Image (tube, grey):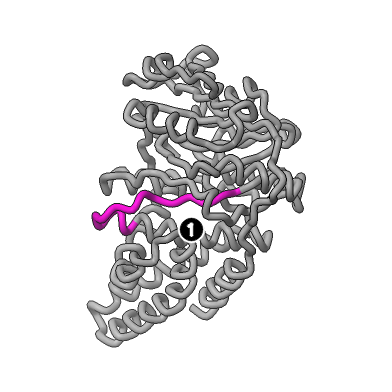
Amino acid sequence: MVVYAVLIAYYHSAWNRLPEFVLPEKNASVFISVIIAARNEENNINGLLQSLYAQRYPKALYEVIIIDDHSTDNTWPLLQEQRFSSMQVKPLQLQDFIEERSAIASYKKKAIETGINAAAGTLIVTTDADCRFNPMWLQTIAGFYEANNAKFIAAPVTFHNQHTLLSVFQSLDFLTLQGITAASVYKRFHSMCNGANLAYEKSAFYEVNGFNNIDNIASGDDMLLMHKIFKQYPNGVFYLKNRAAIVTTDPVTTWKQFFHQRIRWASKADKYDDKRIFIVLLLVYLLNVFFLAGAVAAFFKTTWLMLVLLLLLAKVLIEFPFVNSVAIFFGRQKLMKYFPFLQPLHIGYTIIAGWLGKFGHYEWKGRRIKK
């Protein structure tokens, strides 16, 4: 617990020290290609494109490339129907490049790679079809890119503020992950990011041979690529801390979807070339396993119950100031009243998702992926 407390204090200090980016007065001029892999997103396409059309970045300086990944709904017809007078939209079908029954591990990586190959932009920005954006999103990313000569930019992501137990739990868990992401990238402690809001130079993608050597892993189009670029450009990887850069996405709506999502995230833990993050994940996992072991032991000896409760209280006191500071940035501070009460649920899901991420399987977008 002492080591864990030191780790969280380190993240908290780094988060607070990370300066918020102030957009320069001079407008950026880099051409951006927004790449989106979409599968069965008929309910999100219209909102996605309207949000992208509302960007204040000059329409002549960005294009939108959406790659339909073998959708079985009306995603592709909807993409073909879209007409914008000034925004450049390029819909592509992945099936024109690869059949769904082909023996590849990650269709999403293949879709993103296909989009990048068709992109005209110097700067690639990736996001997801269920995301929505502040009108200054692209302007802020472009300004940060030019101000820092960045090769790779991790940027903030949050969930729509809903009021179910599942959505509140996801939001709080994700706030923690975002704080750790920002702190670790700022301090270059380890590589961490989320594919819903990334930017990287097209030339850097090709220089590290894109997804080569990580294309056999179903997940990891974000963090595994990030570390490849970090190894090539250790001083060119940044976290963009600015509220206008926040991307908002939908939380999953069922516990089954939630567990499959988190198992998918956990499935790449032992594939990280960056062993520093593996050590951090192992520490966190073992701490949570200890709580479970203590709870089981409490059935046989009541002194264990007191120990577990004291350590649980310590865990809340250690984490709360850090997560609260992140929640303030994202405008989610009201959720913190639920934070202490959701700790047992968080411990349980961490143990289950971590175990099944290593030894189980998961379903995503109608596909079943085995470890």
Q: Residue at x 61, y 68 (%)?
A: 14
Q: Is residue 269 visible?
A: no
Q: Residue at x 42, y 54 (%)?
A: 354
The C terminus lies in which quarter of the figure?
Answer: top left
Quadrant of the image occupied by residue 71 = top left
Q: Badge 1: few (under 14), some or many (20 or more) residues near its Cα, within 10 Å?
A: some
Q: Is residue 162 visible?
A: yes
Query: Where in the figure is residue 157, as x and y percent of width and height?
Result: 48, 50
Which amino acid type is marked by label 1? Leu
Q: As drawn, is 111 to the left or to the right of 160?
A: right
Image position of 269 with respect to 123: above or below: below
* Residue span colored magenta: 154-169
Q: Residue at x 63, y 26 (%)?
A: 60
Query: Furthest-top residue in view?
Result: 96
In magenta stretch: residue 81: no
Query: Furthest-front residue in view?
Result: 25
Task: Give the residue at mark 1.
Answer: 177
Query: Where in the figure is residue 84, as x and y percent of width and height?
Result: 48, 20
